[in-house]
Image (spheres, grey):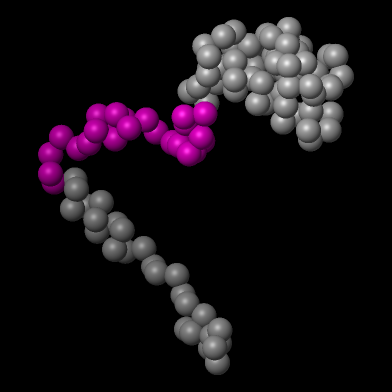
Amino acid sequence: MNKKAELACVYSTLILVDDDVAVTGEKIQTILKAANVDVESYWPGLFAKALEGVNIKELITNIGSGVGKAPAAAPAAAAPASTESAPAKEEKKKEEPEPESDDDMGFGLFD
């Protein structure tokens, strides 16, 4: 599939999702025909099948959240019950050695 056809399938899918229309191969093909874009006949169906069961709006809105990131509510639920454990965590952070800079190794960028 060339890049033009791939982008056309993506854009047609986004149009369908934005209009709250179910993404199907036939509907993608209809938009592609209206846009005068020629793709192999099986691509819209495969593209729709790949997106089956995927909440595309949620996928788009969570792009910057990263993989494996905890939900926003989790840190509040995992907050310590007392304030005694908070200083211990701060002490652990202070004990970690700081990374050495290039100047400490005897060479620097502008020597």
Q: Is residue 44 left or right of residue 16?
A: right
Work out whether residue 48 or residue 95 is closer to the camera in this orientation and state it: 48
In the orientation shown, which residue stands out farthest toward the left? 83
Closest to the observer, 50 or 91: 50
Q: In the displayed orientation, state which residue is furthest to the bottom.
A: 111
Chief secondary structure of the magenta portion? loop
Residue 6 on the magenta span:
no
Looking at this rendering, what residue extends furthest in the right direction? 40
- Is residue 96 shown above or below 26? below
The answer to whether residue 99 is left or right of residue 49 is left
Q: Is residue 105 visible?
A: no
Q: Tell me the magenta residue range.
A: 60-84
> Which percent across, then down, holds residue 4?
78, 33
Examine the image and state in which quarter residue 81 appears: top left
Q: Horizontally, is 97 left or right of 57 in the view?
A: left
In-front residue for pair 79/14 = 14
Coordinates of residue 68 in the picture (x, y in percent): 48, 34
Q: Quadrant of residue 54?
A: top right
Which residue is drawn at the image coordinates 48% and 84% (left, top)?
A: 103
Q: Quadrant of residue 65?
A: top left
Residue drawn at x 24%, y 33% as measured from the top left: 76
Q: Is residue 16 above or below residue 105?
A: above
Quadrant location of the N terminus?
Answer: top right
Q: Is residue 46 above or below residue 97?
A: above
Q: Is 53 situated above or below 8?
A: above
